[in-house]
Structures are given as C-alpha cells and as structure tokens.
Amino acid sequence: MRTDVDIAVIGGGQAGLACGYYLSRAGLDHVILDRQESSGGAWQATWPSLRLFSSSIHSSLPGRPMPPHPDTFPPVDHALDYLTEYEHRYDLPIERPVRVSDVHSLDDGLAVITDNGTLRANYVINATGTWAAPFVPQVEGASDFRGLQLHSAHYRGPHAFDGQRVAVVGGGNSGVQITADLVDHAEEVSLVSARRLRFLPDDVDGRHLFDQATARLDEGDAEAAFVGNIVALPQVRAARAKGALQLRAMFDRMTPHGGVIGREHLDVDAVIWCTGFRPALRHLRSLGLRTARGIPEVAGNRSVKDPRVCFVGYGDWTGPASATLIGVGRTARSLVARLAVELGGS
C-alpha cells in the first residue's frame, strides 16, 4: 500500500467510485481504500430479490451509463456488474481489502491508520456510507424476546422464515419490500411502523425522489417534503393487492413471544428491523468531529472543524439524493473541483 498521497478516499462503493472518477479527470493524486474483497460496496450485502427503484438509465454514475436491463427495475446483480465494470473501465486506483481503523491529525496532513499500514494524506474523503452501521431503536422488553431479531442489513431472503410468523418493523422502502418478499413464505407477516406508509403513484419510480431532491437543492428549500417515498415496485403492488401491507402501529413494548400494540399481543417468531442506518464514521472518532446530532457539521461537504476531512454519499446532510447512484455524482463533482483548486490540479 502507498504511504503518501494527496487524497485518500475511504470506501469503494458508489460514492467512492464517483469521487474517483472526478479525481482522475482532475489529475489529482489519490487512492481509494475499500474494506470489501470485491467490487460493489453495500450492494454486495443486500437480499437477492432487491430491486433498484429506478430504471438503468436513471441509476448511473458519472461518465458511464448503466447498461439497459429488460426489467424496468433492475435486480441487484445488474448493479453489481455495472459497478465492477465501472471501476475497471476508468482504472480507478482501488486497494482492497483494506480496513481503516482510525484517522489522526498531523501538522502536515492526516494519518490514515489501516490494517495494512499507515498512509499520510493531505485530504480524506469519507465515502463509507451507512450500511455498516445499522440502527435498531430501543424498545422496552426487546432483550426478553426469545425469537430471532435481525436488521434488514442482514436479511438474505425469505426461505429462512418459511412457516414462521414475522413482524417487519419499518414503514419505508426496505420494510415494504421485505414484507412483499415474505408474503408467500412466512405463515403470517405483520408490517409494524410508527409512521404511515407514503406511496408514490404507481406510475412513478425512484427518479421522482431524485428530481424532488434536486429541486430542493436548486430552490434552496431544504425543508420541502416529498408527496411520498415508497416506490410501488411490481412485487410491492402484488403484495398490496393481497392485503399484505396493512399497517399495524409500533410496539408499545416487547415480550418473550412478540409485541404489545395497545391492548393486543402480536405473537411472532421473528422480528426484522427495517429501521435505517447511521453514518459509518467510527474510524474518525479520534478527530472528534461529531456533533450532538451524531454527524459532523459540514459546509460544502467538508468538516467545519477540520476542512481536510470531507464527506460524500451519506444522504441529505452531504447533498440531496447523495446516497443514490444517480445523485452522488453532483456532490462528488463539486467537492473535487474545490480540492483541485487548492491542490493546483486541472
């Protein structure tokens, strides 16, 4: 592994690749450190039936369109093949598997501590996403539940739940998709959430979410709300037609055999938490950048406390739609342009 570089990108998923594309075009000295053994970032860890929310043409990284797929909503394998081809096409300088454990401040840069040695960099771009930091809310009695509990990050398909009674907790896209996935396998599936389901119209796909986010950025309206956020994929519409997406209120508390909702006890064998993620930033703990909100304060994708430390691809606080394939390129491009000026690149 190299020991000195202008820019170290931590994370080789879609955000890291988008940054690498613009860094290479700007002629900037950089390396991408990826803890995975192969291409694809978090897409490698998803369940087999997962589908993209948008068509191929609207799921592309900068420079290289995703190849067409016969399905309107391509499967995860198509995304993996695309990301693999993308990094090879642009010969991006990726080193893997390399796990970053810490980053220290130096007088002349930043020390990136890895399991393969220490790298000194002038700047660090964090592109680690959120998949490695699943969030499960604290619910009274959860530790007493005797059945299986797992987060959607660790869900690998419906067959492990054949004949079981399953509660899927979460009213977003993951919760709805996993519920639809389980319908023909589990004995009973209950979708549980503290918020109501907000479907996009059936003829609208995930591109609408990107367009809405882009409009918010262009208009400077960070508080504008979407009319919906759940994409009605074909399997989701089929589950809804069967009545499988009837929403139950969130557990008041859990028991050894399920959960209490008002005066009712819901008996279940397993609980799947589709309750989101937090930014995977533990490797920055020595820099003390996090605020009370749990995320660093940033301006222009750079830490206010230490502008040498940058962030791309974590969601709205790093740019609207920046956690999507089509949306991450915009923030990557603007960040790299600023770094190029400071480093005297093209």
Image (cartoon, grey):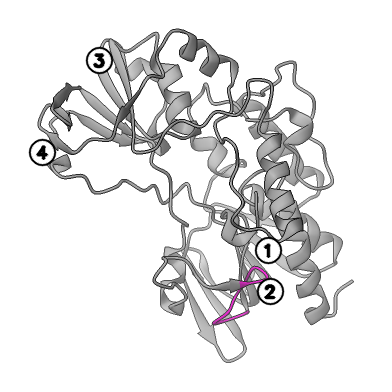
Mark 1, secondary structure of its residue: strand
- Residue 144: mark in rendering: 4
User: How far is the residue under mark 1 from the one under mark 3?
Assistant: 47 Å
Disc 3 + disc 2, Cβ < 8 Å: no
Viewer-side label of 1, 3? 3
In this orientation, does residue 10 appear? no
Q: In which quarter of the image is the N terminus?
A: bottom right
| Direction from residue 165 to residue 97 in the image, left or right | right
Q: For the residue carrying disc 3, how many other residues have a C-alpha within 10 Å: few (<14), some (14-19), or many (20+)?
A: some
Mark carried by residue 5? 2
Q: Mark 1 points at which residue?
A: 31
Q: Position of residue 79 (x, y in %)?
A: 66, 32
The percent position of residue 217, horizontal first and vertical second, equals: 71, 57
Quick one: label 4 or label 3, which is nearer the N terminus? 4
Residue 164 badge: 3
Residue at x 58% of width, y 79% of height: 304
Q: Which of marks 2 and 4 is in front?
A: 4
Q: What residue type is labelled 3?
A: Gln
The reply to whether the magenta stretch includes residue 295 is no
Q: Do the residues labelled 1 and 2 touch (CB within 8 Å)?
A: yes
Question: Magenta segment range?
Answer: 299-307
- Helix, strand or loop: magenta stretch: loop
Query: Nearer the N terminus, badge 2 or badge 4?
Result: 2
Q: Judge depth for marks 3 and 2 and give the one in front.
A: 3
Distance between the alpha carbons at the discs numbered 4 and 1: 46 Å
